[in-house]
Image: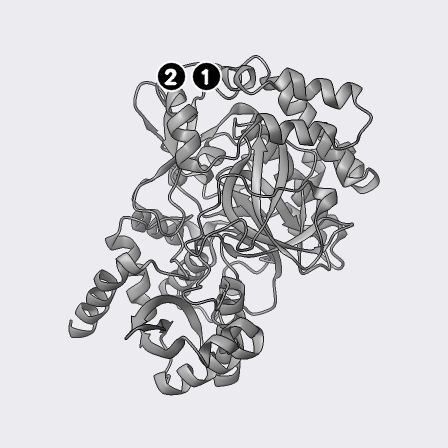
Amino acid sequence: MAIIGTLLKRGIKLRKMIEQERVRPYELQRDELAALLDKAKKTAFGKTYGFEEILHEITYNRDPHAFYKKYKENVPVFTYNKIFQQWWHKTLQGKKNICWPGKIKYFALSSGTSESSSKHIPVTKAMIKAIHKTSVREILSLADYPDLPGKLFQTGMLALGGSTHLNYNGTYFEGDLSGINASRIPFWFQHFYKPGFEIASIADWNTKLEEIVEQAPKWNIGFIAGVPAWIQILMEKIIDRYQLKTIHDIWPNLAVYTHGGVSFEPYRKGFEKLLAHPLIYIETYLASEGFIAYQLPGRNSMRMVLNNGMFYEFVPFNEQNFGSDGEMVENPETLMIDQIEEGKEYALLLSTCAGAWRYLIGDVIKFVDKKACEIVITGRTKHFLSLCGEHLSVDNMNKAVQQVAEEQGIDIREFTVVGIPHGTLFAHHWFIGTDDEADPRLLREKIDEKLKILNDDYRVERAAALKDVYVDVVPTEVFYQWMEHKGKIGGQTKFPRVMKRQQYEEWEAFVKNFANN
């Protein structure tokens, strides 16, 4: 078992994993915040917001939540724009000790799925180390999967991510987080890592894919990791190039696929057509801001990592804390991990070892097991569709599309929906990406029917203000060409499940132009 054996020989400790099993989530998170505050108390941010005062509460006040009350009193909540304008822009200028000790050398470029300009997310050495540690914990958890052959751990791991050739402007490096992480892979792991640094450094995405296809027969791949759409495209290219029946004809030991960023379910049907036998699917929650959670054996949810460089807060995702446009109010209600309830949706705030403090990451999660701290991602704060109170989540959409695809026997790889005016009321316009024969009218009827079952608010509004639903069926290629047109082609890019109305006319014109050509 070469990978696991190498990790253990290198002195990778299991203490952190065992500790999370035995210690209460509240205590782990309290101690994690204390460590973060202590590390950053001499920074400009720490001095401004009284980190020393908060640490005093942790040490001397017997009220178990006194420190958290003080933390909320002293430190405001931040969106990206707010923290960048007030603090992070100084780190881009090369200034030291702003939100985290020292100078920030790396910035992850992140625009999510809908922003037009890139965000610069600080990535510190401490964060890179934390991400690597959580990755190791995920790999070690594979030992708990039954019936995995020992030879699997002798194979390579293909990670399809951004370029390791980072842009450098004389002050800092910038690029995809996946590229930053790959460029800093520990030397003891390089033997297992594919496609290797030379190919990983290629900036042009299509050129990188072609080079991977060219080298594919030389590798013994047991693990793959990446965004579902691009992994599927890569496997299709390999199968087509070498005239294979399945990807297992070239990589017979392929057994594990690690994915994240979007729900895998819309891709599952088409993905599994490319396989000779089932894979183990492991969902991960690795954002530009840090490695938050990953799936454990036998679970359909992900366990949050509570003791590795991040402190979490939870904002109830309701009308008291968020407007109809998904914007968070100035002083929202926030909770610690021991104060949440199962089954309710929360927007996530992060305080991290990269200098993010009470930072709204933009994701909405739901706890399915409070004791085990297991979550599912249900959407984004700005990717819920609620023109008139229908409160339609991305989770609702994924489930409806998946159910319809299974019933109709078609492969729906991409979709997006936008809310539009309908006279004085409203309508939803869906674009369904499939290369199979599909009747738009039938898809409209079935998707509408499923959503009424999945979401009571939607059902009520379909009889009131949400007057119609439109469905266009378009080839899958349209979605990928649009991303390339917008400069968003790459390992971490995803098509938005909910499209902003400002993009609607341009997208419609793009779809029509594709059809006419």
Image quarter for residue 122?
Answer: top left
Quadrant containing the C terminus in the rendered view: bottom left
Q: Kindly tell me whether residue 14 is visible in this rendering.
A: no
Sequence-first tag of 2 and 1: 2
> Is 390 on the left-hand or right-hand side of 419?
right
Please state the horizontal and vertical placement of residue 192, each as a whole percent of the image.
56, 41
Task: For label 1, count other residues whose C-alpha is less than 10 Å away and answer few (under 14), some (14-19) or many (20+).
Answer: some
Tag 2: amino acid: Gly
What residue is shown at x 30% (from left), y 41% (from top)?
Answer: 117
Amino acid at the residue labelled 1? Lys
144, above or below 359, in the image: below
Mark 2 to mark 1 CA distance (whole Å): 7 Å
Report the quarter where the N terminus lies.
Answer: top right
Give the class, few, some or many, for how many residues have Cα within 10 Å of label 2's Cα (few <14, many ≥20): some
Residue designated by label 2: 94
Q: Is residue 334 visible?
A: yes
Residue at (42% x, 65% y) in the render? 239
Residue 7: horizontal and vertical position, in percent?
A: 68, 34
Q: Where is residue 176 in the image (x, y as percent from the top left)?
A: 41, 39
In what element is the residue under mark 2? loop
Does residue 154 appear left or right of residue 17 in this picture?
left
Comparing 22 with 150, the one in front is 22
Q: Name the residue under label 1.
A: 103
Is residue 12 toward the left or the right of residue 278 in the image? right
Viewer-side residue, 476 vs 43: 43
Q: Quick check: 12 above or below 375? A: above
Pointer 2 and pointer 1: residues touching (CB < 8 Å)? yes
- Which image quadrant is residue 8 in? top right
Whole-percent x, y for residue 446 in the image: 47, 83
